[in-house]
Amino acid sequence: MTNFRHITVTVVFVLILCSIGSAGAIRFPPPEFESGYELPDTTVPNPRPGIYDYIDTIVLVLALGLSSYLVLKKRSRKAIFALTVFSLIYFGFYRRGCVCSIGAIQNIVLSFFDPGYAVPFVVLLFFLLPLVFTVFFGRTFCAAVCPLGAIQDVVLLRPFSVPSWLENGLRLLAYVYLGAAVLFAATGSAFIICRYDPFVSFFRLSGNVNVLILGVCFLIVGMFIGRPYCRFFCPYGVILRQLSRISKWRVTITPDECIKCRLCEDSCPFGAVKKPVEQWPAKEYDRSKKRLALLIVLLPILIFFGGWAGYGLRTTTAKVHATVRLAERVRLEETGKVEGTTDASDAFRSTGTETSELYDDASNIRARFGLGGWIFGGFVGFVIGMKLIGVSIWRKRTDYEADRASCLACGRCFEYCPREHLRRKKDSTSQNITAEESDKAEFKSGGGR
Amino acid sequence: MAEKSKPSPDRRQFLAEAFRYAALGTLGVIGGAAFAKRYRMVQDGKCVDSGLCKECGLFEKCYKPQVWQIDPYKCIACGNCATYCVLEESAVKCVQVYPVCGYCKICFGFFEPEPHDINEGAENQLCPTGAIKRTYIEDPYYEYTIDESLCIGCGKCVKGCNTFGNGSFFLQVRHDRCLNCNECAIAAACPSGAFVRVPADRPYLLKEVEHA
């Protein structure tokens, strides 16, 4: 045993000498075998072939087309739900939630700011196709294609309505989330939409515990509040909302005319059914007009203060970037404010880069966060201002309508409309009639012979 | 008066139409710019601007689909790969590149720093799962093979082999397992910036032996 210790110590000593002599190089020349031994190959299994990306894209186009058809033409909640379940299985559990249209925002942004990154074709299409469909057909992507919406839709048990002031307030979070996601993607810091995607752990059946807990919370809340992620957090939903406002075709609760029966009033779990509104009362008109004028004046002020606050937060937001964190750590270590080192600071020192170079990099990134903070904060200020203006405008409405922006095109309200039931009855009878007519025609032509 | 203050349906329709075209145009510009980027980009300093294709006169594509990989020369084998991967069993595994291996009798990737004995006994092994197989080839050479089904990608052997040996053990993302997440969770936790995106048609960064 002592003999062996001795040998090891000697070997280690020799090895250390060798390693000092040639760090990183091959210390022991590979042997030349006499027994005819052949070197095995290292296996290199290939990634998933690119053809599957095209299959995903084709499935996406088909699902979007089918969803639009089911929502606008067929008007069948059951069929929409069936497609929802399919999307949940295919885009969710089979494709494991990646790549999704929501996360694709970050890839697009990164490709504009990082000279070394270009967007994969499938990611570009996943970003663009739902937007194009929304411009024409409304949010049919949300209805039955998005796996994140699907998983929330299937757990919706007993929806409670959210008061409109709370709904409007919480919705601002989605805008902030979008702005932050763009800021961090543009600076190359992080893809926060992917990092905090609450449902992707379910799709993969594994993942970070904290995010899994977040997902469980979302699903429990989602049993009673319809689709909380879609309504209050989804950054892609923000873009879809705006495009849905100008869509060429959109969901109508009634197939033809509204008879104001109020049956659909509470049918929407997402609070997207808008009640008729009277003409603006004359006595409130002047006061409201003044308030509106004030809010419009307030808008640039909000934008400025938002931007100023975003700029002020630059040292905090910049900490998300790994280089900035590393530079701060190294500075603390160099100035002796902390004891010991981290893996990252060790790795940095082993590269032999000058610390001043690292500090310069970090301050460049901080400067970018300063500019980004102005834009991000200004955006948030603009959104808050526009929201205030939006809720102060009185719009006359005569019928019960699905709100253009908030409607997720799930089709639940169709079943509540008596006109819809009438249409279905008519459709089935007219089909019978046409069948009878064709029978007659056949009979006639048969008799003519 | 009341009729005049209400916008006529025509005007509303016209505005909606205009906004729609504007939105489609914006999407077209964004999509086009992102698409054009695939023809002009820097990739490891190789493809700065692919310029025009000599035969067809159109832009030549220099973009390739990308996957995550570990640069073995930057990796410090900190052990994050074993714990941060979104998969229960990490997609990162240790690989052995045989031409680099010294076939040492006493392998510092295989044995504990102070082994009780020089044999394959579990108490002597560094690998927590016993994933490395040691086989006698000829005196004094031993072959070390990694059983990937046991390897958890902790990098203990990598550290040992890098410190005292040739560094033929190193961590690589195994693409039969990797989900190619949009943001790799390990890359976000990597302290040395060793995670990089590489072209999918050359998805491994294997060490190569430098012949004198």
Image (tube, coloured by chain):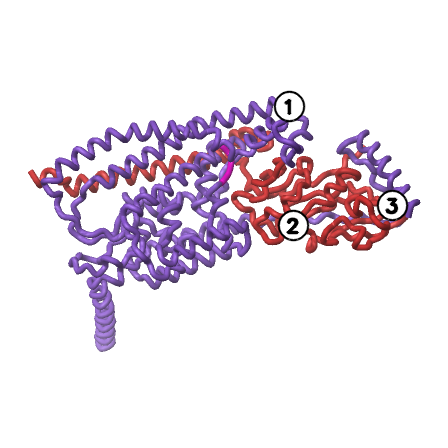
Is label 2 on the same chain as label 3?
yes
Assess disc 3: are there few (<14), some (14-19) or many (≥20) residues with their C-alpha within 10 Å of its C-alpha: few
Image location of residue A282, percent across then percent down: 9, 40
Quadrant including the C terminus of chain A: bottom left
The answer for how far apart the CA atoms under marks 2 and 1 are is 39 Å
Is label 2 on the same chain as label 1?
yes
Question: Range of the magenta residues?
Answer: A187-191
Question: Disc 1 on helix, strand or loop?
Answer: loop
Image location of residue A336, percent across then percent down: 63, 26
Of the pair A70 and A356, the residue shown nearer to us: A356
The chain to which mark 3 is attached is A
Q: Is residue A188 magenta?
A: yes
Q: Which mark is residue A305?
A: none
The chain to which mark 1 is attached is A
Assess disc 1: are there few (<14), some (14-19) or many (≥20) residues with their C-alpha within 10 Å of its C-alpha: few
Of the pair B149 and B38, the residue shown nearer to us: B149
Q: Residue furthest bottom?
A: A447
Image location of residue A389, percent across then percent down: 24, 37
Q: Which residue is mark 2?
A: A45
Who's purple, chain-wise?
A
Q: Which mark is residue A33?
A: 3
The chain to which mark 2 is attached is A
Q: Which mark is residue A354?
A: 1
Image location of residue A156, percent across then percent down: 37, 59
Amino acid type at circle 2 is: Pro
Q: Residue at x 56, y 34 (%)?
A: A322
Q: Is residue B57 visible?
A: no
Amino acid type at circle 3 is: Phe
Amino acid type at circle 1 is: Glu
Look at chain B in the picture and name its colour. red
Q: Residue at x 59, y 43 (%)?
A: B186
In the image, A260: left or right of B31?
left
